[in-house]
């Protein structure tokens, strides 16, 4: 077998264009956003350098910001909580369904739908019964009228209603990822475990989960980072209302930047969001690396 020997300089020359493009599209905007967060600027006219004033106001004077951070982190926790459910569904599909591809594709369908379509669909479902809201009509039909709610206009439950929609939309996405990982586990391992008396949930605990940890980590990272950036679903369904009850970091950043025309202030929120994403990714990678070493 002939091995192609290439100098490091040649490799660097081939990698350089993609690296420059990546830097321009990822790191440069981050640096520009960090700098903009130090300005008092409406995004159009002249700017004034104010140093850390935007960050000081953000952390100590903004009454919307910290509740929005709390909702965003809760969004991330709920999103990660569905990954074990997706793994369990993938295990059942792989074990009991002879040709599971159709079911996996069906579960994946909500992911490929437009967020606007999904938002409008669930807004209709959440409507009051008098306006054709299916959920409230079903509760009334089951003599559970006391359970009916104004799902998207009650500040106490509006955010949880959106959490549920997001979980419904992305459950199939993570099921597909976990199913693909499980299919790549050699069947010989399960056969050997069966001979030793380990099958069913016991085999899943000692074989499926440890072998699927790298794929599980991918789902966790995607769910967490995606939740931190949650924006479109909330803007379609509630716009951050009622009374900022469904505002998250991204919607608050949008409102400050483009509705209040405080572009510098909005950039400081963006810089905070980038920092949270970076720290979260480092922590998740560290925890899963330890988990991989434990089961390796």
Image (tube, rainbow, N blue to C red):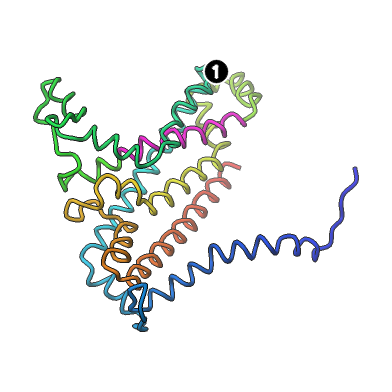
- Outermost residue, left direction? 146
Name the residue located 38 percent from the left edge and 69 percent from the top edge: 267
- Rendered image quadrant of residue 83: top left
Would residue 145 be visible to someone looking at this image? yes
Q: Is residue 96 left or right of residue 241?
A: right
Question: Which residue appears farthest toward the front when viewing the image?
Answer: 45
Within the image, what quadrant is residue 56 found in? Answer: bottom left
- Residue segment shown in magenta: 164-184
> In this picture, is 272 found above or below 295?
below
Which image quarter holds the N terminus?
top right
Residue hosting label 1 = 99
Q: Residues within 10 Å of mark 1 (few under 14, many from 20)?
A: few
The answer, for residue 207, to whether it is visible in the render is: no
Q: Is residue 201 left or right of 251 when viewed as pictured? A: right
In x, y percent, where is residue 148?
13, 32
Residue placed most toward the observer, 49 or 99:
49
Label 1 residue SS: loop
On screen, residue 30 above or below 289? below
Which residue shows up at 40% across the image and 43% down it? Answer: 80
Instruction: Identify whether 58 is placed above or below 5.
Output: below
Let me know if residue 268 is in the magenta part.
Answer: no
The majority secondary structure of the magenta stretch comes to helix
Judge whether 254 appears above or below 119 on screen.
below
Please report the residue visible at 49 percent of the width from the left and 51 percent of the height from the top. Answer: 287
Q: Position of residue 95 (x, y in %)?
A: 52, 20
Q: Tell me the quarter of the image containing the C terminus.
A: top right
Near-viewer residue (119 or 214): 119
Q: Is residue 167 magenta?
A: yes
Closer-to-camera residue (289/122): 122
Q: Quadrant of residue 109?
A: top left
Residue, x 59% and y 28% (percent of image)? Answer: 183
């Amino acid at each position: 077998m002939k091995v192609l020997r290439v100098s490091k300089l040649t490799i660097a020359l081939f990698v350089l264009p993609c690296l420059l493009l990546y830097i321009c599209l990822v790191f440069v905007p981050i640096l520009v956003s960090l700098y903009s967060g130090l300005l008092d600027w409406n995004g159009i006219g002249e700017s004034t350098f104010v140093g850390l004033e935007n960050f000081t106001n953000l952390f100590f004077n903004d009454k919307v910001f910290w509740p929005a951070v709390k909702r965003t982190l809760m969004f991330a926790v709920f999103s990660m909580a569905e990954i074990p459910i997706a793994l369990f569904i993938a295990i059942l599909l792989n074990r009991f369904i002879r040709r599971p591809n159709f079911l996996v594709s069906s579960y994946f369908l909500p992911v490929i739908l437009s967020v606007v379509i999904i938002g409008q669909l669930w807004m209709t479902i959440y409507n009051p019964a008098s306006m054709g809201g299916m959920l409230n009509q079903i509760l009334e039909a089951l003599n559970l009228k006391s359970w009916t709610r104004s799902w998207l206009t009650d500040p106490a439950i509006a955010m949880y209603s959106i959490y549920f929609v997001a979980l419904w939309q992305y459950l199939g996405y993570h099921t597909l990822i976990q199913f693909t990982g499980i299919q790549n586990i050699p069947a010989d391992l399960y056969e050997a475990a069966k001979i030793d008396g380990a099958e069913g949930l016991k085999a899943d605990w000692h074989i499926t989960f440890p072998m699927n940890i790298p794929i599980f980590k991918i789902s966790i990272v995607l769910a967490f980072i995606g939740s931190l950036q949650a924006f479109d679903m909330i803007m379609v369904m509630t716009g951050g209302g009622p009374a900022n009850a469904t505002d998250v970091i991204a919607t608050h950043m949008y409102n400050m930047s483009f509705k209040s025309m405080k572009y510098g202030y909005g950039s400081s929120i963006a810089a905070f969001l980038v920092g949270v994403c970076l720290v979260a990714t480092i922590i998740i990678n560290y925890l899963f690396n330890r988990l991989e070493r434990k089961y390796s």
